[in-house]
Image (cartoon, helix red, strand yellow):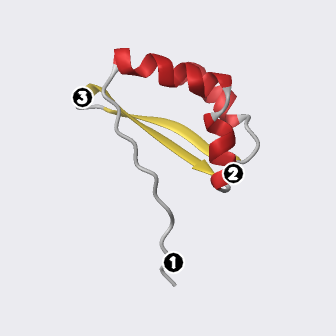
């Protein structure tokens, strides 16, 4: 499911990063790392057919936890 989403998400306007990380010690554990230019790009992403398909299918496949974080100014 995640591998199939990659090209669609990466092609979205406002997408800066869309990567999937796997835990070598736990083959069933994945981390999805996404970065968008702003909140509007995130909302546009969440309205796409591929995202809605993901949202509909992921509950049957895995437990999902999501964090939305913002950069910290470390100057």
Looking at the image, which residue is at 73% across and 34% down? 11
Say which element carries label 3.
strand
Q: Residues within 10 Å of mark 2 (few under 14, many from 20)?
A: few
Instruction: Residue under label 1, please give it.
Output: 73
Q: Position of residue 60 (x, y in %)?
A: 36, 14
Kindly identify the residue that appears in the image at 56 percent across and 19 percent down.
53
Report how far apart the C-alphas of labels 2 and 3 lie in the structure: 34 Å
Q: Nearer the viewer, residue 52 or 11?
A: 52
Viewer-proximal residue, 58 or 26? 58
Q: Give the residue pinned by disc 3.
A: 26
Tell me which numbered mark, 3 or 1, is placed earlier along the sequence: 3
Local SS, label 1: loop
Q: Is residue 59 left or right of residue 56?
A: left
Q: Is residue 17 left or right of residue 14?
A: left
Kindly identify which residue carries mark 2.
Answer: 40
Residue sticking out furthest to the bottom: 75
Q: Please say if the residues under marks 3 and 1 sit with CB atoms less than 8 Å apart.
A: no
Q: How many residues crowd around disc 1 within 10 Å: few (fewer than 14), some, or many (20 or more)?
A: few
- Circle 2 SS class: helix
Question: Is residue 9 positioned above or below 39 on the image?
Answer: above
Please report whichever mark, 2 or 3, sits nearer to the chain's N-terminal start.
3
Q: Dot 3, how many residues are within 10 Å of its Cα: few (below 14), some (14-19), or many (20+)?
A: few
Instruction: Choose mark 2 or mark 3, whichever is in front.
Output: 2
Image vertical order of residue 71 relative to residue 24, above or below: below
Residue 48, x across and y down, in percent:
67, 29
Q: Is residue 16 visible?
A: no
Q: What whole-number distance in Å separates the C-alpha atoms at marks 1 and 2?
A: 21 Å
């Amino acid at each position: 499911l995640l591998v199939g989403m990659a090209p669609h998400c990466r092609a979205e306007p406002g997408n800066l990063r869309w990567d999937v990380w796997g835990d070598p010690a736990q083959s069933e554990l994945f981390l999805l790392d996404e970065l968008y230019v702003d909140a509007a790009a995130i909302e546009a992403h969440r309205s796409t057919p591929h995202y809605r398909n993901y949202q509909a299918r992921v509950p049957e496949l895995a437990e999902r936890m999501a964090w939305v974080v913002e950069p910290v100014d470390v100057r």
